[in-house]
Amino acid sequence: MKPNLKACGQAMMTAMVNAVLAVALMLLVEFAISGSFQVPEPYLWAGLLIWLVIFAGQFWRQRHLCRSAQSHE
């Protein structure tokens, strides 16, 4: 169970950082186009979707890495 928790934590942090950076980039482009820092709702949904996709991929990857590191010990 411990490798799954470690993998979940690492995947969650990676996904959060990437999602925040993606939303920040979207807001920066929105500001460049419109001149205001309004946060349209689709940007939040896009950030959530980005977080989910990256979390799923990173969780699978980190779980595999944690298990292979544990089996080598």
Image (spheres, rainbow, N blue to C red):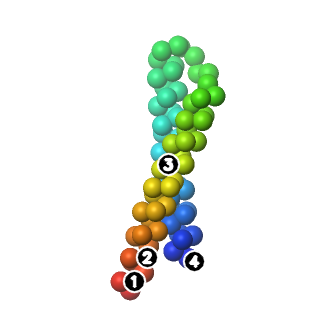
Which quadrant of the rendered structure holds the N terminus?
bottom right
Residue that carries the numbered disc 3 in the rendered image: 53
Secondary-structure class at tag 3: helix
Which residue is farthest bottom?
Answer: 73
Residue closest to the eye, 73 or 55: 55
Q: Are marks 2 and 3 in contact (CB under 8 Å)?
A: no
Residue 71 tag number: 1
The location of residue 52, given as percent across then percent down, is 54, 48
- The amino acid beneath tag 3 is Val
The location of residue 60, given as percent across then percent down, is 46, 62
Is residue 17 visible in the rendered structure shown here?
no
Q: Alpha-carbon distance for marks 1 and 2?
A: 6 Å
Residue that appears at 50% across and 55% down: 56
Residue that appears at 57% across and 16% down: 36
Q: Earlier in the sequence, mark 3 or mark 4?
A: 4
The location of residue 40, given as percent across then percent down, is 61, 25
- The amino acid beneath tag 4 is Met
The location of residue 53, given as percent across then percent down, is 50, 48
Q: Earlier in the sequence, mark 1 or mark 3?
A: 3
Residue that carries the numbered disc 2 in the rendered image: 67
Residue that carries the numbered disc 4 in the rendered image: 1
